[in-house]
Image: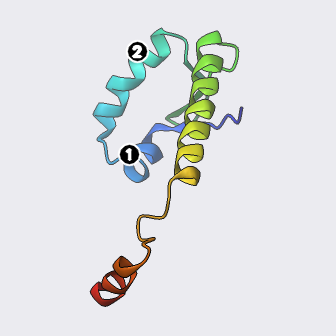
Amino acid sequence: METKYINVTKLSCHDTRLSRKSIYKALGPLLDYGLVIESRTIANTTLYKLNTDSKAVHFIDKFNNELIRVISDRECTQENPLEVKGKDAIAAIKSR
């Protein structure tokens, strides 16, 4: 599991399109449940990181990895939607 520090100010501006207020509101329960912990403070900025000691974080990570595998397998086994055969092939080429 890769852990990174989460800079809330940078996160709010670049990654989520959420306001800083919304991020702090969501951060509260994550801290309460012990999924995220304060890691350090630089100047007036508090950095957070995943709590890798939390069993819940490990279960979420396993679930996320399994979900990615299932979605990837499904996409790999689906036929190409543009693949057509016979007379339909000529119609598909003309429509492009």
Taking depth in this image into account, of 36 and 80 the one nearest to the observer is 80
Give x and y (percent) for residue 1. Answer: 71, 32
Please, is residue 23 above or below residue 78 in the view?
above
Q: Secondary structure at mark 2?
A: helix
* Amino acid type indicated by mark 2: Pro
Image-based side of 62 in relation to 28, left or right: right
Taking depth in this image into account, of 2 and 96 the one nearest to the observer is 96
Residue 39 in view, yes or no:
no
Give x and y (percent) for residue 27. Answer: 42, 24
Res. 81 mark: none
Res. 16 mark: 1
Residue 10 in view, yes or no:
yes
Res. 29 mark: 2
Q: Residue at x 57, y 22 (%)?
A: 60
Q: CA distance from mark 1 to mark 2?
A: 18 Å
Q: Secondary structure at mark 1?
A: loop
- For label 2, the crowd category at 10 Å Cα-Cα, with few meaning under 14, some 14 to 19 and many 20 or more, is few
Taking depth in this image into account, of 48 and 72 the one nearest to the observer is 72
Q: Residue at x 61, y 17 (%)?
A: 59
Q: Residue at x 61, y 36 (%)?
A: 5
Which residue extends farthest bottom?
94
Q: Residue at x 61, y 31 (%)?
A: 66
